[in-house]
Image: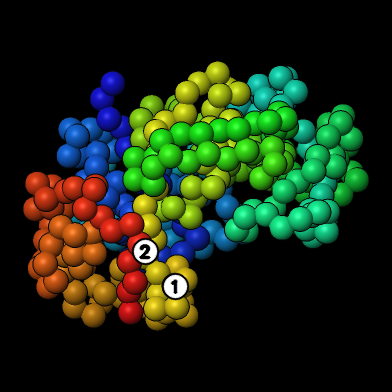
Amino acid sequence: MSYVGRLAPSPTGALHLGNVRTFMVAWLRARSLGGKVVFRMEDLDHPKDKPGAAAEAVRDLRWLGFDWDEEYVQSERKDLYRAALEKLVEKGLAYPCICSRRDVESAQSAPHAGEQLHYPGTCRGRFASWREANAARANPCWRFKVPDDAVVSFDDAFAGRYEQDVSKTLGDFPLARDEFGAGYTLACVVDDLDMGITEVVRGDDLLPATPAQILIARSLGRDAPSYCHLPLVVGPDGRRLAKRHGDTRVASFREAGWSAERILGLLAASCGWAEKGEELSLAALLPRFDLAAIPKAPFVYG
């Protein structure tokens, strides 16, 4: 099977150095293997989506030298998510839930790893339909009914072997906060399957969410893609890049006179492929690409 990778930005903010580093590795990984790159705008997080951010992300990526072979926009693919949700509901694997995050937090009997909350299945079998749930409390979510002892393990191309008991760690996790399934978790899985993605390259902050996505893929009768989770770019305080670390937007570097090659050279040096100060294009980085050379620790910028 030929390699198919993806670039999947969200229009919730401007493209910054952390995004670019991950996209750089994803692009180089695909092109170095003679594979295809799919571009997907993940624009379903409507409350956080910022006007103009999608177009700006495309401009920034093109300026940096990225190209791709296919292009999709999630908000134009809602029929696919609806069909997948209906399939899960028919199998008894999805149900509407009216519990708020505060409800779930108060139901915690013990702390769980990271920011993940364990949901005990409070609304399992409680409502016959989305409408009934919505009448009880506005804007319910769909949850995936996780089987008991749902242990998922996989070999990550960068992070190595990873295993999680989803039933004990997450419980019944959210699929979408939309009546017809147009939400990040379900849409992400459906798109990866429909687009034939063979490997997902992304930040390791999403590693703990991966077993849940694998469960969804299996429940839809398909094998999930392979995964490659990379260390993030963080500030001096060890937290991932944000406004508190200053302006790390691509647009700001460009306005300050940086070339695309200077930005890519900086990020390539952080991956062990270049000397500090080198300026390199994506094409020039192709023969230098080496996944194993990337440090296991996060890249500290600032």
Give the SS element for disc 1.
loop
Vertical comparison of 68 with 58: above or below: above
Quadrant for the N terminus in the image? top left
Vertical comparison of 45 with 257: above or below: above
Q: Nearer the viewer, residue 168 or 106?
A: 168
Q: Residues within 10 Å of mark 1 (few under 14, many from 20)?
A: few
- Identified by mark 2, the residue type is Pro
Determine whether, in the image, residue 80 is placed left or right of residue 244: right
Give residue 92's position: percent from left, percent from top.
Answer: 75, 23
- Identified by mark 1, the residue type is Gly
Q: Residues within 10 Å of mark 2 (few under 14, many from 20)?
A: some
Determine whether, in the image, residue 255 is placed left or right of residue 237: left
Q: Earlier in the sequence, mark 2 or mark 1?
A: 1
Q: Nearer the viewer, residue 29 or 129?
A: 29
Give the SS element for disc 2.
loop
Residue 295 image-quadrant placement: bottom left
Residue 236 image-quadrant placement: bottom left
Residue at which label 2 appears: 298
Q: Nearer the viewer, residue 239 or 217?
A: 239
Question: Which residue is located at x 18 percent, y 78 percent?
Answer: 257
Residue at which label 1 appears: 238
Question: Which residue is located at x 83 percent, y 34 percent?
Answer: 124
Give residue 123's position: percent from left, percent from top.
Answer: 84, 39
Question: Which residue is located at x 56 percent, y 33 percent?
Answer: 152
Q: Is residue 62 visible in this depiction of the protein?
A: no
